[in-house]
Amino acid sequence: MRVGITTIAKMLNLSPSTVSRVINGKGNFSEETRKKVMDAVKEMNYIPNSIARKLQQKETKLIGVIIPDITETFFASVIKGIEEVLSEKGYNIFLCNTNENADKERKYVDLLYENRVDGIIVATVRNNIASDDILFNGNIPFIFIDNTPNEGNQFNSVTTDNFLAGKMAADYLISKGHTKIAAIMGKQDETTGRKRFEGFLKGLEENSISKDESLYKFCDFKEASGCRAMEELIEQKGFTAVFIASSKMVYGALWAVKKAGLVVPDDISIIGFDIIDKYQVISPGITSVIQLEDEIGKSSAKLLIEKIKNKEDKLYHQLYMEPKIIERESVKNIM
């Protein structure tokens, strides 16, 4: 059982305020009282309640970070960037993993409010958040990262320019001579998935390439659905290249290609998303659109601190980070 100041005070027949003053080294007390209290603290393994102390100062130095999937390398890198900035400013992270469950996300928001965090960074899985939700109606500053609600713009956010990312992928494949281009895309009710697909279609349009709806598969960003989508495309045929809009779907699609006895890029060219492959263990290396995860983390933390320090600032800031392409061997030049 955790020992508190009140317990020590009763044991020593002192007031809680006197014990508190001794422990915190503030106010007047005798050397005899100081020794008596500190001996009791040592004997009873008293641990100061830092949260209670921070609440008295009207801050906790805690930041809630809510993510949908802790196993995603993207979120691991984002959290690293967040933590780097926050630790420099004296903040600690309260990390919550929702497993892409909207109800868990709501519960975590409530929990963070109960723990009086100073701010919240959330990669939401809720595509429509009511205007009376505690996030919008509460008094704790928050920042959206990765995905954002579909409706309205009354929030602060730091995300990849997903429209540009999709367009860059299409433009790259077209620059290598591909015109029969398939796509394995994420959920279209999420801003990330929808914007990547919209950008992809814009790239086709600007290069006068007609859409072929039969070549577009929509999945849940996971390996299994990426594998099924690629199996369907291989059975259909009629394409030379495919844009796969998440790393896990890329891994699933590669498994389908291998099972079919096909070879990348000789049989199918692939441009992926977020395949960093730092040690280049995937062969051939996958050309990929890359998000600046670390910068997303750092920028969201910096923006949140600004909002915490200046709560009178009612302006909304929506930052879009420009992606880049890492070129490897998975796209065949057929020009």
Image (tube, rainbow, N blue to C red):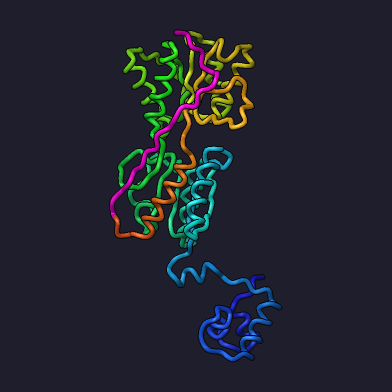
In this picture, is 304 found above or below 38? above
Point out the stretch of residues depicted in magenta: 314-335
* Residue 39 shows in this picture: yes
**Residue 245 part of the magenta-drawn span:** no
Q: Position of residue 318 (x, y in %)?
A: 34, 43
State the quadrant of the C terminus. Answer: top left
Left or right: 34, with 320 as reference point: right
Q: State whether the magenta stretch is mostly helix, strand or loop.
A: loop
Of residues 273 and 87, the one drawn nearer to the viewer in this rendering = 87
* Residue 304 at x, y percent in the picture: 40, 53
Name the foreground residue: 224 vs 165: 165
Q: Residue visible at 44% across and 65% down? A: 59
Q: Nearer the viewer, residue 165 or 257?
A: 165
Find residue 286 and report its horizontal and vertical position in percent: 55, 23
Q: In the rendered image, which quarter contains the N terminus? A: bottom right
Please tell me which residue is depicted at 42% across the width and 46% down the height of the picture: 299
Is residue 246 placed above or below 50 in the rendered structure? above
With respect to residue 316, does 329 lie above or below?
Answer: above
Image-quadrant location for residue 213: top left
Residue 191 visible here: no
The quadrant where residue 13 appears: bottom right
Determine the residue positioned at 51% across, 85% down: 27
| 330 in the magenta segment | yes
